[in-house]
Amino acid sequence: MLIESPVAYVGLAVLLVLILASVVTFIIKKQQGHSLSTQAVELDQRIRSWWWMMILLFGCLFLGKLASITLFMFISYLALKEFFSTVPTQHVDRSVLFWAYLSIPLQYYWVYSAWYGMFLVFIPVYVFLLLPFRRVLTQKAEGFTQAMGIIHWGVMLSVFCLSHIAFLLQVDTHSTASSGSSLVLLLLLTTQFNDIAQYICGKSFGKHKIIPQISPNKTWEGFIGGVICTTILTSQLAPLLSPFSFSQSLILGLIISSMGFVGDVVMSAVKRDLGIKDYSQLIPGHGGILDRCDSLIYTAPLFFHYYAYLYY
Amino acid sequence: MKKSLYKLLFFALWMKPLAFILIGLNIVRVGTLPTEGPSVVIANHNSHLDALILMSLYPLRIINQVRPVAAADYFFKNKYLKWFATRCLDIVPIDRNNRQLNETFEICNTALNNGQILLLFPEGSRGNPEELGKIKKGLFYMLKDRADLACLKIVPVFMYGLGKALPRGEALLVPFNVDVIIGKALVFPETSKDFVHAIGQTFQDLQSYCLHKGVFQELKDE
């Protein structure tokens, strides 16, 4: 049964792609000999990291719901930690940050218990109202407004938005072929594919800058190439992994590719504002969790609600 | 033997996972950490976690050779803390109130002579969160008469973020990522003044490798 599930088929396909990527990297390294270019080193690191990320993802998906939800909870935690470590905070904010961290296990408990209503309102309503109160209890007004804006935005990005990936595991797909985990896979693969496609198209054909003040390496050619490639991939993958029809899959491809781009540039704007290159060094070759999940922050909730609108 | 096992288990089962999960390190290697004694690692001091995080950078295989120099009056003030400081950390205890500096220096030099790697905080105490305090001269006088000065490695390490995670006077640990910048070995200077200046300057230089730009405004030189 496990072997026949579409998740396993897609897993095999990912395995083949990774093997191919590793072989190509190996050949490039062989050609360059001892004096490896920095690009080759980075490519090598990236592919290695992709192996680890895919092993973790598929491992947890096969282990089941609890393991998968725990994985996404941990990812949310690492993302929030990166965010709080990057943005300016004060000594008095520490207690508020601590409470903000506590929202993670609770939010993922609502996911685990499939409490849809609470999952939707917990962070935008309850956490939103509680954190400023905790800051008031510190009796220090200095920097209050700025701190609350920063902290709540961070919780929304890293906990609320990313937890939508995990809630996909709880939806009823009304079919035997697809399941919650196949929806997760569809979201993650299309979003990450879009990142890579936009990068490669930009590197190959990029001429006209799309948003130079925020992200100088992004081009119209990269963006449009990514949209085309991702929409094609989604139209093939979605009917296999989800109940989406062909035309619905095309729209999904457009949502993923365009909104993935938006997520990417939003998180780049934060980095540019703070004058940093990466959020952390957690994933060799990629940077931090937030560098890898920037587009997911946008695509996860939008994918979820597109699905919920059509099928829930 | 038993004593070293506590330390090994403490770092393997508790400190290393904690450094990864609750803290999260961004390590920048400008130089390399010494893996053989006698050598001295000096770092800026903001938190109780400083020594623990520095030690967790070392592979378990040589963790028993790495010993933090710490104040006996603080760490031996009750029996639980003393047990932890001697068993799990294996500190080199120095008495800050002892006017006989030679005795203090001798304890450290004996450890160095045994081929150990000492961790030292030349600012003395932890000071205000993420602020560089005044560099003390003690280390210069401790080392200056050593015969092996030419090959003794003194490696500076700058850490940013632990003063946010667990600052002085706070009991609540709040998770923050930490930048750890490992500098190049220092050349031992002629005078204590040069020594203090060199250390202060190195810490300043290493700050520029921090991931976070905010550091520049937040850190003030003495």
Image: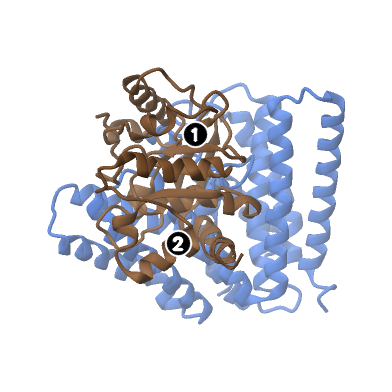
Chain colours: A blue, B brown
Q: Is residue B179 visible?
A: no
**Where residue A159 appears, x then y in whole percent?**
44, 61
Specify the label residue A277 is tagged with: 1
Mark 2 and mark 1 on one chain: no
For disc 1, the neighbor class at 10 Å (few under 14, some 14 to 19, many from 20) is some
What kind of element bears circle 1? loop
Q: Is residue A66 left or right of residue B167?
A: right
Q: Nearer the viewer, residue B106 or A259?
A: B106
Q: In the image, is residue B220 above or below residue A73?
A: above
The residue that appears at 58% across and 26% down in the rendered structure is B151
C-alpha gap between disc 2 and disc 1: 41 Å
**Where residue A40 appears, x then y in whole percent?**
74, 30
Q: Chain of mark 1?
A: A
The residue that appears at 29% across and 64% down in the rendered structure is B77
Q: Name the mark nearer the viewer: 2 or 1.
A: 2
Q: Quadrant of the C terminus of chain B?
A: top left
Q: Which residue is mark 2?
A: B86
Q: In the image, is residue B149 above or below residue A80?
A: above
Q: Quadrant of the N terminus of chain B?
A: bottom right
Circle 1: residue type: Lys
Q: Chain of mark 2?
A: B
The residue that appears at 29% across and 47% down in the rendered structure is A89
The residue that appears at 33% across and 34% down in the rendered structure is B138
Query: Do the residues under discs 2 and 1 have CB atoms within 8 angstroms?
Result: no
Circle 2: residue type: Thr
Q: Nearer the viewer, residue B147 or A34?
A: B147
Q: Nearer the viewer, residue B158 or A226?
A: B158
Q: Is residue A211 visible?
A: yes
Q: Nearer the viewer, residue B101 or B29?
A: B101
**Where residue B200 appears, x then y in whole percent?**
35, 27
